[in-house]
Image (tube, rainbow, N blue to C red):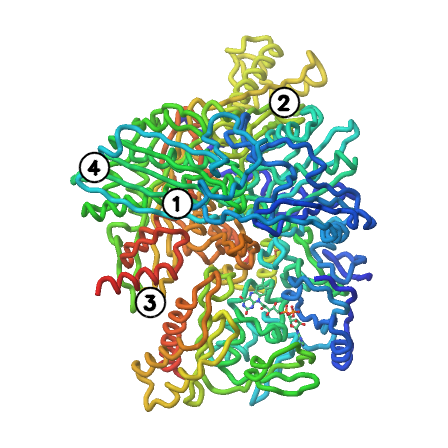
């Protein structure tokens, strides 16, 4: 079936199977920043913004995205680039497999004007697993990023 | 899960008809749990066009559409005010924000998941379910019912009462299923205790409730006796904990929960 | 140390921004279009012989291009271990075999036009098995009636104690002095037995590979691997493809931790592409990553320790048993490190013995995993040290400080034990363990908080700690090389074989080159790794990259510096000695300065044209250990045994930190993996040997709420033999948490948990048992 949506503010039409999930559709169409880390909706690597809210794209049926507004990390270059600088300062940039998902979640925190305290950051990002860092460096970087924006 | 076709239904009647037409047809809510099943679905009945994602507040009750996401509930002021936020607290400990933006309250109830964190909280309040065909039934009755559900859940009603609540999820990590979860409430002088992830599905700890509800005064000794009663529920072992350890957790947290709601101002 | 501009400075990583912005980087992002999808049929049985395998129905499915079974491969025993050659692991695995030795072992592979077709074909393959009795308890594996490897065409490459007819993959024994005698003469002795569990790597990028034939008809693999050269060699030997016809490219890798040191999908992808001529891809599902790659070696370790009443430790006896699972990858070497990277910490003993068998079972294979044995050994030894301290009535850190190895000291173990072979004698030229301990105690507030404080009804807070060491590469074995090339406009390319797998080695190596060349890091364009284009490197393992590959880069950079100065001298017509050169401008008294940019433009376009390029290579003649002291503060619920990690404070001596932020990242990331292992991570099997924790719903890794606070510091230390004074830092973080947490739990409630993970349930039960015994 065909779905029409906006991806990073551009109109797109994709042909999708009824049991296909957004992560697979997007990768199939070349948007490889959205990656898969698990098969049980447990890791957050595949995080995508649908209508500005983070969701696991590995569990979001593509057919349901008809008419939706999707944002991948390519759609938020400024957030990603600035956040990367804060990550770099604290050694939070390791393999980076988890990073695009985190950038999107942070972007949505910023958009919805959430407070940049440790507890809020942890609560908002607990679903984004990282196996490389000890998380503390990420938390500090996110806090610094959100703090800069205030 | 394989889905041969996905049907975004326009009416509840259509959903109900499709569901009963073929045993291989399935209602899809958030779809996150269904995704992990290995079955082949003939028609996926997608409820997302039915505007069932709402939370309505009346003076007596909260009416929650079955497609309301857990994240909507977690952040809703009315839900947060109910029983000192017992339900939103329980929800806030389910996976991450991303998943909660996707999964629904309806899917969370229909699945009768043993690990469910919402069920103890809902049981410790006064909750009923409104089905398209069957109409309204109490949550407890639904949890005790057996067999395939051939009906579409439309909404969840929670009686609005003045009360206080306590919720505890014992878990290995923030993203783990509960080793045990427990909700304790006090409203209009009556206590309720619901214990889940035993690992079977949540249930009211009636003996323990009786102990406190019939007591002249809910002193520490009464609570200790009630907590002991909680261990007589049926517990079993799985990789995250043994039967014995679950019983210990039930005792400890029943005691702590009761004390907290007893001492908490309404 | 001379003032540095780049090294030991805050320098952003060369790749962090591009990765965060989602640029195509990882193997699956670079898969050729139309690649055949490979799916693997895996064994449902823990041990079985395939009696028949019928692929005819699967072959008939449209879109299926190839099905491979054991009948399609020549029997060439190999090891997936991904080590240097000859490997210290037995050659005991076949690409596909008629035996399947664990649930998840490969039975057949399908290559089809898409995933759905490949999956359908996998289901359509009809296999008959003769089920065999599996060995599922490693303590009964040796001399069991069941032989995990009954076949005769498997072998060891050199003596490692390989004895498959007894289910022994390898075994080891060494003794210094007379342990039995020393122990029997000790005034105080303690003994305890410890168990460590299988831990899963859970790198977030699953094992991924794709293969294609290029227009020279060569096999090109893009693989998420830590060891491209070993992959190339092992593929060539096993599939009998000339080495010269294989190219292995390692793009960005999404974490490895040892799991990607091994060969996983590469063999099947190569075979499919060689046979069909078509590109192919194989990405493990998360379940396959759990069930069909590697875990950490589970072990049983019995420690006996003897001491004088004054607290002098006189002897240590270490007797272990390690479970290598179905195949013997890293069997001997991991086990040896269990001793060799722990026992030298207490170098003043009169006698020390280390021995044990590494046995086959029908579980998922064990393999390399960050910490590599040292974490298991550390848990056993460092727990026992605390037990001994209690018996002596001494503070456990006073006991450590009295007995631990200090700067300029050595241990006879270095010479006796290497990795699979004999070792190399060395003196600790840099060892700030004494500072690490003293500073760590300050950071955690040891003097005020040790051992415990009640913090409320049924809550106590306590402190526990441990010390650790690791290595920096394998001496005389690990080799790394680096090539530096000058470009017009005066910037450099640095190509290295060293594999960045997310640990930041590209950045660190670029910093080392930039420092020596006197330029900013963005003037050094780093590329890793490609067996066609970059020089050799053994790969990212054994904590070797900074030390070994870093030294190679330093050599190459020194040589390049000389080359540009010589060229400048020729251009300016002066003696090289008369030139002062920081990195960008050649200055000579009395004549106009020449910039590097002008020089290089001239070299490429105008006069005396030539390409400047140079290669440095390095192998270690020793393996200077990094050291650390780790302290944890926990708060424990005395009714339920639940505990929270309030703070983990560590002080690390890794020599110079080339990039302090990345070094911190390595330490805290390692700590988190060690904490996961200590506290809850646990690979579990059903009674029939099927993994029941084979997904992220049932196998839990730490989250951002698992540890409240890390405090991480580095000792001021300089290792003469390392590049700008650096040693390694990649693994050591993993080592201390199991013992530190076990010690903290003991200090909180007086129960010693001697099996990992240290779960609330175990603590609660031990407290209960203790209470009953006390009554
Ligand atoms: C990785 C993961 C971890 C989780 N961890 C937890 C946890 O720790 N605690 C916890 O409480 N929960 C947890 N859950 C469960 C989650 O909160 C939801 O309850 C679950 O995903 C089901 O919601 P859904 O909207 O995805 O339902 P779906 O998967 O769409 O549906 C679930 C079932 O309900 C049926 N159904 C759904 N809606 C209706 C309806 N309106 N009428 C009739 N039938 C209906 C479906 O047919 C299906 O059988 C977890 C889920 C996942 C995926
Ligand atoms: S891929 Fe793991 S949550 Fe989506
Ligand atoms: S940086 Fe590797 S998973 Fe987060």
Q: Nearer the viewer, residue C723 or C584?
A: C723
Report the quarter where the N terminus of chain B lies. Answer: bottom right
Numbered mark located on residue C300 in the image: 1
Q: Which residue is mark 4?
A: C184
Q: Which residue is mark 3?
A: C639
Can residue C206 be seen in this snapshot? yes
Numbered mark located on residue C486 in the image: 2
Q: Nearer the viewer, residue C223 or B74?
A: C223
Classify the position of ligand 1 by quadrant: top left, top right, bottom left or bottom right: bottom right
Question: Label 4: chain?
Answer: C
Residue C66 higher or lower than C642, as above or below: above
- Are there few (<14), some (14-19), or many (20+) residues within 10 Å of tag 4? few
Residue that protrudes farthest toward the front in the picture? C145
- Are there few (<14), some (14-19), or many (20+) residues within 10 Å of tag 3? some
Q: CA distance from mark 2 to mark 4?
A: 66 Å
Q: Earlier in the sequence, mark 3 or mark 4?
A: 4
Which residue is drawn at the image coordinates 72% and 56% (left, top)?
A8
- Are there few (<14), some (14-19), or many (20+) residues within 10 Å of tag 2? many
Can residue C518 be seen in this snapshot? no
In percent of width and height, residue C119 lies at 73, 52
Q: CA distance from mark 3 to mark 1?
A: 29 Å
Q: Tag 1, which secondary structure? A: strand
């Amino acid at each position: 079936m065909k779905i029409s949506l906006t991806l990073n503010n551009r109109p797109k039409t994709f042909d999708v199977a009824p049991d296909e999930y957004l992560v697979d559709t997007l990768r199939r169409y070349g948007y490889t920043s959205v990656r898969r880390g698990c098969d049980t909706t447990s890791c957050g690597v595949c995080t995508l913004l649908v209508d500005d809210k983070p969701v696991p794209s590995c569990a979001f049926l593509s057919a349901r995205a008809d008419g939706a507004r999707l944002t991948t990390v390519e759609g938020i270059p400024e957030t990603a680039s600035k956040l990367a600088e804060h990550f770099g300062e604290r050694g939070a940039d390791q393999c980076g497999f988890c990073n695009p998902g985190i950038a999107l979640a942070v972007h949505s925190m910023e958009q919805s004007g959430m407070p940049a305290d440790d507890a809020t950051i942890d609560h908002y990002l607990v679903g984004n697993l990282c196996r490389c860092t000890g998380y503390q460096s990420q938390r500090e970087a996110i806090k610094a990023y959100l703090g800069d924006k205030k | 899960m394989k889905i041969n076709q996905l049907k975004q239904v326009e009416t509840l009647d259509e959903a109900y008809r499709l569901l009963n037409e073929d045993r291989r047809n399935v209602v899809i809510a958030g779809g996150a749990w269904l995704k992990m099943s290995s079955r082949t679905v003939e028609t996926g009945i997608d409820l997302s066009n039915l505007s069932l994602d709402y939370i309505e507040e009346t003076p007596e009750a909260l009416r929650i559409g079955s497609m309301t996401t857990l994240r909507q509930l977690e952040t809703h002021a009315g839900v947060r005010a109910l029983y000192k936020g017992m339900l939103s607290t329980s929800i806030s400990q389910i996976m991450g924000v991303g998943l909660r933006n996707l999964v629904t309250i309806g899917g969370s109830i229909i699945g009768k998941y043993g690990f469910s964190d919402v069920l103890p909280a809902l049981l410790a309040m006064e909750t009923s379910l409104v089905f398209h065909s069957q109409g309204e039934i109490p949550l407890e009755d639904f949890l005790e019912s057996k067999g395939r559900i051939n009906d579409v859940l439309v909404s969840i009603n929670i009686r609005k009462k003045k009360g206080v609540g306590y919720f505890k999820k014992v878990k290995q990590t923030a993203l783990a299923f509960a080793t045990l979860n427990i909700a304790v409430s006090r409203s209009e002088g009556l206590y309720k205790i619901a214990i889940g992830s035993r690992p079977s599905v949540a249930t009211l700890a009636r003996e323990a409730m009786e102990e406190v509800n019939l007591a002249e005064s809910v002193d520490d000794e009464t609570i200790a006796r009630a907590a002991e009663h909680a261990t007589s529920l049926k517990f079993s072992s799985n990789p995250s904990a043994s039967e014995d350890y679950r019983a210990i957790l039930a005792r400890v947290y029943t005691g702590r929960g009761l004390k907290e709601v007893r001492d908490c101002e309404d | 140390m001379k003032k540095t501009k780049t090294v030991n400075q805050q320098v952003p990583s060369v790749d962090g921004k591009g990765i965060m912005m989602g640029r195509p980087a990882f193997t699956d992002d670079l898969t050729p279009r139309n690649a055949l999808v490979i799916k693997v049929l895996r064994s449902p049985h823990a041990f079985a012989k395939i009696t028949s395998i019928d692929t005819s129905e699967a072959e008939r499915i449209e879109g299926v291009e190839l099905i491979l079974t054991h009948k399609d491969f020549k029997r060439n025993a190999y090891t997936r271990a991904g080590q240097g050659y000859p490997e210290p692991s037995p050659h005991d695995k076949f690409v596909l075999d008629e035996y399947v030795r664990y649930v998840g072992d490969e039975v057949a592979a399908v290559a089809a036009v898409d995933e759905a077709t490949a999956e359908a074909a996998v289901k359509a393959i009809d296999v008959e098995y003769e089920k065999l009795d599996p060995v599922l308890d490693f303590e009964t594996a040796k001399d069991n009636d069941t032989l995990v490897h009954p076949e005769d065409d498997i072998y060891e490459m050199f003596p490692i104690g390989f004895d498959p007819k007894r289910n022994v993959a390898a075994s080891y024994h060494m003794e210094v002095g007379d342990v039995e005698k020393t122990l029997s003469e000790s005034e105080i002795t303690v003994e305890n037995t410890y168990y460590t569990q299988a831990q899963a790597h859970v790198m977030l990028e699953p094992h991924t590979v794709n293969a294609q034939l290029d227009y020279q008809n060569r096999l090109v693999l893009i693989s998420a691997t830590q060891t491209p050269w070993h992959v190339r060699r092992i593929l060539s030997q096993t599939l009998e493809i000339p080495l010269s016809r294989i190219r292995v490219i390692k793009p960005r890798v999404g974490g490895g931790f040892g799991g990607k040191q091994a060969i996983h999908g590469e063999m099947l992808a190569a075979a499919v592409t060689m046979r069909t001529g078509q590109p192919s891809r194989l990405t493990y599902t998360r379940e396959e990553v759990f069930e069909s790659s590697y875990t950490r070696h589970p072990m049983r370790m019995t420690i006996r320790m003897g001491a004088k009443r004054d607290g002098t430790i006189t002897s240590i006896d270490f007797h272990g048993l390690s479970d290598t699972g179905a195949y013997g990858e890293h069997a001997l070497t991991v086990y040896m490190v269990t001793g060799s990277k722990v026992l030298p910490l207490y170098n003043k003993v009169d006698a020390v013995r280390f021995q044990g068998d590494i046995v086959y079972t029908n579980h998922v294979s064990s393999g390399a995993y960050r910490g590599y044995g040292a974490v298991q050994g550390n848990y056993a030894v460092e727990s026992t040290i605390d037990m001994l301290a209690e018996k002596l009535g001494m503070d456990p850190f006073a006991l450590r400080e009295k007995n631990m190895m200090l700067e300029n000291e050595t241990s006879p173990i270095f010479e006796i034990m290497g990795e699979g072979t004999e070792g190399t004698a060395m003196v600790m030229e840099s060892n700030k363990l004494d500072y690490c301990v003293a500073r760590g105690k300050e950071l955690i507030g040891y003097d005020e908080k040790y051992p415990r404080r009640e913090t409320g009804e049924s809550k106590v807070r306590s402190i526990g700690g441990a010390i650790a060491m690791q290595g920096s590469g394998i001496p005389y074995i690990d080799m790394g090389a680096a090539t530096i090339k000058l470009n017009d406009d005066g910037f450099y390319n640095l190509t290295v074989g060293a594999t960045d797998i997310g640990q930041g080695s590209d950045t660190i190596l670029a910093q080392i080159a930039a420092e020596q060349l006197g330029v900013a890091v963005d003037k050094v364009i780093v590329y890793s790794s490609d067996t066609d284009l970059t020089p050799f490197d053994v790969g990212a393992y054994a904590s070797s990259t900074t030390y070994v590959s870093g030294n190679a880069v330093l050599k190459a950079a020194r040589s390049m510096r000389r080359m540009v100065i010589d060229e400048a001298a020729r251009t300016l017509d002066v003696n090289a000695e008369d030139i002062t050169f920081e990195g960008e401008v050649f200055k000579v008294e009395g004549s106009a300065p020449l910039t590097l940019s002008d020089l290089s433009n001239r070299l490429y376009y105008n006069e005396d044209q030539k390409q400047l390029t140079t290669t440095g290579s390095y192998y270690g003649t020793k393996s200077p250990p990094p050291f650390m002291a780790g302290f944890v503060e926990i708060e424990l619920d005395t009714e339920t045994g639940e505990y929270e990690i309030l703070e983990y404070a560590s002080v690390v001596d890794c020599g110079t930190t080339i990039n302090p932020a990345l070094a911190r990242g390595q330490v805290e990331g390692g700590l988190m993996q060690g904490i996961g292992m200590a506290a809850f991570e646990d690979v579990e099997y059903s009674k029939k040997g099927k993994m029941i924790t084979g997904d992220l719903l049932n196998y839990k890794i730490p989250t951002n709420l698992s540890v409240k606070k890390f405090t991480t510091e580095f000792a001021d230390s300089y290792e003469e033999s390392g590049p700008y004074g650096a040693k390694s830092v990649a693994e050591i973080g993993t080592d201390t948490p199991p013992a530190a947490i076990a010690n903290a739990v003991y200090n909180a409630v007086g129960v010693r948990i001697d099996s990992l993970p240290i779960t609330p349930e175990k603590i609660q039960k031990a407290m209960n048992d203790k209470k009953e015994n006390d009554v």
